Image: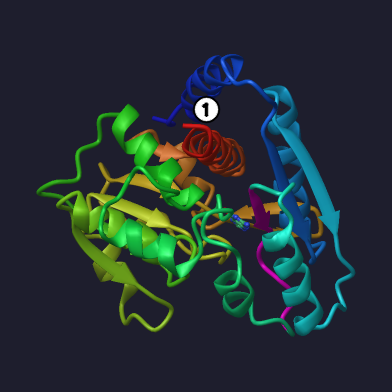
């Protein structure tokens, strides 16, 4: 069975459109794009499209890829100081010569609707759902709730180590009483862990990492990321998994685009409400 991500995203957007109707002004969301890799460009296009659709002003600032770390840091500082910029994101990944965490650490936590700043991550660890939960993990929680997939008493395997999905995802799941198996690229015998899990969340950025013989046949598979090679999209889960109707699986890229983006819009609306209380 394939999880109907479109329906889940549509419900979120309907709710957000209703919320925005009562706002006195149009919220604005800024995005800084440095690395024009195909995945980031696709993400940004979707963010732009959905922001417009629900009446959020989306302003994209494109920066040359060869920018020095210090200069990007200064742009982030300008964004923090600019009273006309209430909320913004820095699209990841950044080019390899830039330390992403250094840049994220300098985004003002109140403007950080991605929820990546350490202060905001800390709130996630402590289960403060009223703040900005990073968008992809927030989207996954939304799926689990809407599909009534309970994680208490269950084993959830989360693959692979990253600051923007894996760490907040593990934090959210432990708060939800799941038994979490947090795998990384140095985990031995990955298949032993995946095949004992009731839910497998794969965000590895590694084409077809998760194979049919690595899972329980009734497991729920949540496939988060994809890689684009020569214009072809490769999921982290082998496409053969989708043909097998045993389990619930989220198809990417549709899912990633729709739910991560929907949760970014939700965080922006949340931020507007906090500011205009
Ligand atoms: N790259 C992949 N996912 C995300 C996300 O949620 N936010 C940002 N800023 N970059 C990303």
Q: Which residue is mark 1?
A: 9
Residue located 35% across and 65% down the image? 122
Residue located 75% across and 28% down the image? 52
- Give the vertical position of 244 relative to 114 (above or below): above
Q: Quadrant of residue 101?
A: bottom right
- Give the vertical position of 73 relative to 171 (above or below): below
What is the span of residues highlighted in magenta in the rendered image?
87-96
Q: Is residue 266 left or right of residue 131?
A: right
The one of 270 and 211 positioned closer to us in this rendering: 270
Q: Is residue 235 left or right of residue 237?
A: right
Q: Is residue 155 left or right of residue 23?
A: left
Q: Is residue 87 shown to the viewer in this render?
A: yes
Main secondary structure of the magenta stretch: loop
Residue 263 at x, y = what percent? 51, 39
Residue 191 at x, y = what percent? 31, 68
Answer few, some or many: residues within 10 Å of disc 1's Cα (few below 14, many 20 plus, some between 14 and 19).
many
**How many callouts does the rendering have?**
1
- Give the vertical position of 54 relative to 95 (above or below): above
């Amino acid at each position: 069975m394939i999880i109907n991500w479109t329906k889940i995203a549509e419900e979120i957007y309907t709710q957000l459109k209703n919320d925005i109707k009562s706002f006195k002004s149009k919220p604005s969301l800024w995005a800084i794009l440095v690395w024009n890799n195909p995945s980031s460009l696709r993400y940004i296009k979707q963010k732009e499209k959905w922001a417009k659709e629900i009446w959020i002003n989306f302003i994209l600032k494109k920066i040359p890829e060869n920018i020095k770390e210090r200069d990007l840091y200064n742009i982030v500082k300008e964004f923090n100081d600019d009273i006309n910029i209430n909320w913004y994101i820095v699209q990841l990944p950044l080019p390899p010569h830039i330390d992403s965490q250094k840049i994220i650490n300098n985004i003002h936590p109140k403007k950080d609707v991605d929820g990546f700043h350490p202060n905001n991550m800390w709130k996630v660890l402590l289960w403060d759902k009223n703040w900005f939960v990073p968008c992809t993990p927030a989207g996954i929680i939304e799926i689990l709730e809407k599909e009534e997939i309970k994680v208490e008493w269950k084993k959830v395997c989360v693959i692979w180590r990253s600051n923007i999905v894996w760490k907040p995802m593990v934090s959210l799941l432990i708060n939800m009483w799941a038994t979490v198996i947090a795998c990384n690229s140095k985990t031995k015998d990955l298949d032993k862990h995946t095949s004992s899990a009731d839910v497998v969340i794969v965000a590895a950025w590694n084409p077809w990492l998760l194979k049919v013989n690595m899972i329980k046949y009734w497991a729920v598979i949540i496939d988060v990321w994809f890689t684009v090679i020569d214009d072809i999209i490769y999921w982290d889960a082998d496409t053969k998994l989708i043909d097998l109707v045993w389990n619930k699986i989220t198809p990417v890229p549709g899912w990633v685009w729709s739910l991560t983006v929907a949760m970014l819009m939700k965080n922006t609306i949340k931020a507007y409400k906090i500011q205009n209380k």
